[in-house]
Amino acid sequence: MSTRGGEIASAAETLIGTRFRLHGRNPETGLDCIGLVGQALESCGRLVHYPQGYKLRNIDIARWLEFAGANGLRDCAGPAERGHILLTQPGPAQHHLLIALGGGQFVHAHAGLRRVVSQRISLIRPPLAQWRFEPDREQSWPL
């Protein structure tokens, strides 16, 4: 686990209980899973570039991958460690970001429960992508 990974996980834990809101970027008004990851990155001093125009259900994951690359996240593999960010597919055309706390525990913005929660999750399928924060990685964003 990197120190930054621990910081991201700790930042996410402080957001548990925040209400869910699709496209939510502010903890005071609500967060979705991208907003949760973005807020955790901002807590680590990162200027976050958010994707636009996604829906609750999406067939294409390009925006998710662009979001990761634009915000200093680097591909990684293996068991999810504290601070890793996973892109999962919980259902058809549904994609979701989780922040690992370790030991199968994750923080995520749960649309059904309408809150950011911490849950033990057994992933049925491998994640579509898994990243860790690289604080020295140069930020880029397509114009």
Image (spheres, rainbow, N blue to C red):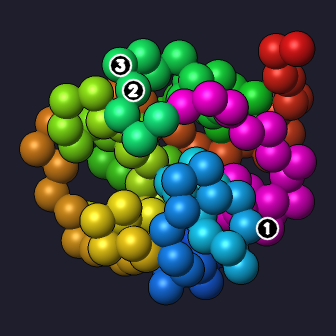
Residue 103 is situated, as x and y percent measured from the top left of the image, at 28, 69
Q: Position of residue 42 (x, y in %)?
A: 80, 60
Part of the protein shown in magenta: 36-54
Which type of secondary structure does the marked residue at label 3 adopt? loop
Q: Quadrant of the N terminus?
A: bottom right
Say which of 129 and 29 sits in front.
Answer: 29
Circle 2 crowding by C-alpha within 10 Å: few under 14, some 14–19, many from 20:
few
- Check the image and report above or below for 138 versus 40: above
Type of amino acid under label 3: Ile
Residue at (68% x, 31% y) in the render: 52
* Residue marked by disc 1: 43
The C terminus, quarter of image: top right
Q: Which residue is found at the position 70% from the left and 58% from the top? A: 25
Q: Earlier in the sequence, mark 3 or mark 1?
A: 1
Please identify the quarter of the rendering in which residue 11 is found: bottom right
Identify which residue is drawn at 15% across, 57% down: 122
Question: Was residue 52 drawn as part of the magenta stretch in this picture?
Answer: yes
Q: Is residue 143 left or right of residue 25?
A: right
Q: What's the amino acid at mark 1? A: Ser
Q: Amino acid at mark 2?
A: Asn
Q: Residues within 10 Å of mark 3 (few under 14, many from 20)?
A: few
Instruction: Tell me: 19 left or right of 134.
Output: left
Q: Is residue 67 visible?
A: yes
Q: Which mark is residue 59?
A: 3
The CA span between labels 1 and 2 is 28 Å
- The answer to whether mark 3 and mark 2 are in CB contact below 8 A is yes
Is residue 29 on the magenta stretch? Answer: no
Task: Give the mark nearer the N terminus: 1 vs 2.
Answer: 1
